[in-house]
Image (cartoon, helix red, strand yellow):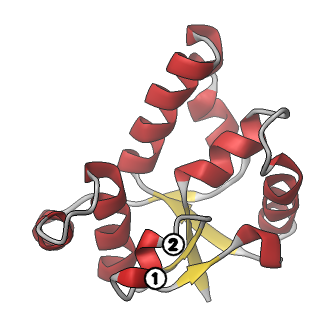
Amino acid sequence: MEYLVDADVLYAYMNPPDWLHNHAVKVVEKIKKGELKAKVSPIIILELAIVIKRDLSEEAMLRIYEKIKDLKVEILSVNEKTVEEAFKYLKKNMGIFDAYHAATAKTYNLTIIGTDQKYDKVGVKRLDPRQL
């Protein structure tokens, strides 16, 4: 099975005080060992950059790309099908980032690793990182 790592997990991994940090570290360890085949999208990276710059610092934000590259996760493309799917989710009152993450998971047939239960409500497969 292949996974899309949601921004909340990556944020928690990069922010030790975060309530999800220990679980996020476990997820990342499994990715690094090759036990989880994980991917991210440019939209996830964008959301992460915005939140890290706001909550932590610009310096921390500028290190995101290198940290993600160190994880050896594939960065997926956002294509027209993804955009079309995202707008279907937007019409279901999802937020912009969540709609794009759901659309990416659907387009690439991935399970999202994240804590947001909104995905469950729209039929997107999700694995809570606390279950790993």
Which secondary structure lies at badge 2?
Answer: loop
Amino acid, disc 2? Gln
Residue 44 point in image, percent of width and height = 44, 48
User: Left or right: where does residue 87 sit relative to residue 132?
Assistant: left
Res 5 → quadrant: bottom right
Q: Are marks 1 and 2 in contact (CB under 8 Å)?
A: yes
Query: Seen in the image, is 75 located left or right of residue 58?
Result: left
For the residue marked with disc 1, what is the amino acid?
Answer: Asp
Q: Please state the horizontal and vertical placement of residue 100, each as a whole percent of the image.
A: 29, 60
What label sits on residue 120 in the rendered view?
A: 1
Q: Is residue 35 visible?
A: no
Above or below, 42 relative to 113: above
Residue that numbered label 2 is attached to: 117
In the structure shown, which secondary structural element does the residue marked by tag 1 occupy? helix
For the residue carrying disc 2, how many other residues have a C-alpha within 10 Å: few (<14), some (14-19), or many (20+)? Answer: few
Give above or below for 30 relative to 127. above
Q: CA distance from mark 1 to mark 2?
A: 5 Å
Q: Nearer the viewer, residue 6 or 95?
A: 95
Q: Residue at x 60, y 30 (%)?
A: 64
